[in-house]
Image (cartoon, grey):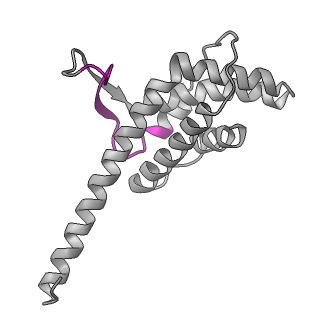
C-alpha cells in the first residue's frame, strides 16, 4: 500500500504527459490504491484535512475533468444523480495519502495503515471508485474509437475482415 501511495503522490507532483497517458496512468494508480486499501486491516484514528492545489492542477491535465455519477448505485432507479470532478478527487486522495505517508516516514507504519483504512472507508472510497469508473469509461470509449479508425483504414486498403 505504501509503495503505491508514494508512487501516486510522486505522480501528482510530476509534469503531465499527453491526455491519453494521463488518463491511463491515473486509472492504473487509482485502481491499485483502491485494491490496496481493501486489503488493509481495520483501524481507527483522527483525519487531518490538507489541501493540495498542486495535485489538483496535475489531475486537470487528464482527458476530462467532470463526470456523471449517482450517489448510491444500489438504488434502482437512482433517486439522486451527482457529478464528480476528477481533479478534485485526485487532489483529495493526494492530500490524504501524503499526510499518512508522513507517518510512514517517521516509522509509524501501523498508525499510517490505520489512518489510510479509516480514510478509505469514511471519505476516499467514493471519489476513488467514481474516478476509476469515469476513467474506465473514457479508456474504453477511446479504445473502441481507435479500433473503428483502424477498421476503416483496413477496409479502404481493400482488405477484408
Q: Is residue 30 left or right of residue 70?
A: right
**Majority secondary structure of the magenta segment?**
loop
If the image is split into quadrants, where does the C terminus sit?
bottom left
The residue drawn where x is 62% and y is 18% is 118
Q: Position of residue 27 (x, y in %)?
A: 46, 46
Residue extending farthest to the top is 46
Residue at the farthest bottom position? 158
Q: Check the picture and name the quadrant holding the N terminus.
A: top right
Q: Nearer the viewer, residue 65 or 153?
A: 153
Q: Camera-side residue: 159 or 12? A: 159
60 magenta-colored: yes
- Residue at position x 14%, y 82% from top? 155
Say if 140 sits above or below 76 in the image.
Answer: below
Residue 66: within the magenta? yes
Q: Measured from the top left, where is residue 57 in percent x and y?
A: 48, 35
Q: Foreground residue, 114 or 50?
A: 114
77 w.r.t. 56: above or below: above
For residue 102, side relative to residue 5 (left or right):
right
Residue 158 location in percent, x, y? 13, 90
Residue 153: image quadrant is: bottom left
- Give the residue drawn at x 50%, y 26%: 125
x then y, percent, for residue 38: 58, 32
Q: Which quarter of the picture shows residue 107? A: top right
- At x 71% / y 20%, what residue is drawn? 114
- Left or right: where does residue 98 sit relative to residue 28? right
As drawn, 97 above or below 62: above
**Magenta residue span:** 58-75
Toward which corner of the image does residue 131 lie, by quadrant? Answer: top left
Amino acid at each position: 500500500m505504501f509503495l503505491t501511495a508514494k508512487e501516486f503522490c510522486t505522480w501528482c507532483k510530476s509534469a503531465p504527459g499527453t491526455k491519453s497517458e494521463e488518463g491511463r496512468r491515473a486509472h492504473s494508480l487509482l485502481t491499485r490504491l483502491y485494491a490496496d486499501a481493501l486489503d488493509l486491516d481495520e483501524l481507527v484514528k483522527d483525519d487531518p484535512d490538507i489541501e493540495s492545489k498542486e495535485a489538483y492542477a496535475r489531475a486537470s491535465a487528464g482527458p476530462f475533468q467532470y463526470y456523471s455519477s449517482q450517489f448510491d448505485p444500489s438504488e434502482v432507479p437512482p433517486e439522486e444523480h451527482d457529478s464528480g470532478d476528477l481533479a478534485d478527487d485526485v487532489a483529495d486522495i493526494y492530500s490524504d495519502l501524503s499526510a499518512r505517508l508522513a507517518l510512514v516516514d517517521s516509522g509509524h507504519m501501523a498508525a499510517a495503515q490505520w489512518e489510510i483504512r479509516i480514510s478509505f472507508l469514511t471519505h476516499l472510497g467514493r471519489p476513488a471508485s467514481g474516478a476509476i469508473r469515469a476513467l474506465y469509461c473514457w479508456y474504453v470509449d477511446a479504445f473502441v474509437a481507435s479500433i473503428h479508425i483502424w477498421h476503416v483504414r483496413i477496409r479502404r486498403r481493400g482488405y477484408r475482415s
